[in-house]
Image (cartoon, helix red, strand yellow):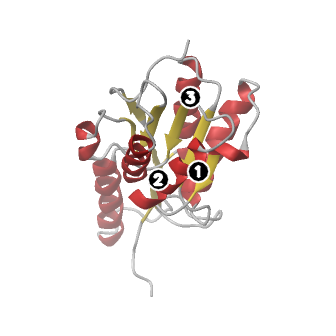
């Protein structure tokens, strides 16, 4: 249609498209490595749908961190579903039924984390005393979860701002080349994680 647009999120292939995103491989690597440094060796993953680039990238970062520390990947503590509360709820139930449940879980979205927290509570599992939870996106409700949720800040506002800025520059003729902008992430530390010693 020859209409200027910018993707928020990395294109699925090496296409010549303007986009703004985080480095989701690095973000998931850093989140997993943080849990490992907190003493966790069995770290479960409740991931989004593997049809999505963001989920594939976060899964890759998780695997890379485990590999760096010579930790085997255990499929019994890994699930994926849609980015909704119910997906987190069902994923946590499945993982907690594993013969050897993890001491920490990463959910790749805060809404999924809310579902996971509810499932743990329903099964009599305490967070963070029995299992720590790390999440992604740091939505405003994260700090009001019980317990307040440690989450990866993806800078959603800045992602939107930078995407709009690129579109405006294209419309005004100030930019003709393809633009790809990658924003840093960082962990917001709250009370959903404890050391495993």
Q: Which residue is mark 1?
A: 94
Q: Secondary structure at mark 3?
A: loop
Instruction: Provide the residue designation for mark 2.
Output: 88
Q: Which quadrant holds residue 129?
A: top left
State how far apart marks 1 and 3 are (Cα): 14 Å
Left or right position of 38 against 167: right
Task: Return the disc, 1 or 2, that comes first in the chain's sequence.
Answer: 2
Tell me which residue sits at (28%, 54%) in the image. Answer: 161
Do the residues bearing badges 3 and 2 touch, measured as CB atoms within 8 Å?
Answer: no
Quarter where residue 56 is shown: bottom right
* Numbered label attached to residue 103: 3
Q: Earlier in the sequence, mark 3 or mark 2?
A: 2
Where is residue 126? Give x, y as percent.
41, 31
Under tag 1, what secondary structure?
helix
Binning the other alpha carbons within 10 Å of mark 2 as few (below 14), some (14 to 19) or many (20 upward) gives many
Could you tell me which residue is drawn at 44 percent across and 20 percent down? Answer: 194
Q: CA distance from mark 1 to mark 2?
A: 10 Å
Q: Please name whichever residue, 148 or 129, is drawn nearer the observer in this view of the structure.
A: 129
| Residue 25 visible within the image | no
């Amino acid at each position: 249609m020859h209409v200027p647009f910018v993707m928020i999120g990395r294109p699925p292939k090496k296409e010549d498209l303007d986009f703004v995103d985080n480095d989701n491989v690095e973000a998931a690597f850093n989140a997993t490595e943080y849990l490992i440094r907190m003493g966790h060796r069995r770290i479960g993953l409740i991931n989004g749908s593997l049809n999505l680039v963001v989920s594939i990238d976060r899964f890759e970062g998780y695997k890379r961190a485990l590999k760096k520390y010579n930790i085997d990947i255990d499929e019994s503590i890994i699930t994926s579903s849609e980015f909704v509360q119910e997906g987190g709820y069902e994923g946590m139930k499945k993982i907690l039924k594993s013969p050897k449940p993890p001491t920490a879980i990463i959910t790749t979205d805060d809404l999924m984390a809310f579902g996971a927290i509810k499932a743990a509570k329903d099964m009599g599992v305490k967070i963070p005393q029995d299992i720590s939870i790390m999440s992604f996106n740091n939505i405003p409700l994260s700090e009001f979860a019980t317990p307040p949720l440690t989450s990866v800040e993806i800078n959603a506002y800045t992602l939107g701002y930078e995407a709009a800025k690129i579109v405006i520059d294209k419309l005004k003729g100030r930019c003709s080349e393809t633009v790809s902008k990658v924003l840093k992430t960082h962990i917001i530390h709250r009370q959903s994680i404890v050391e495993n010693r």
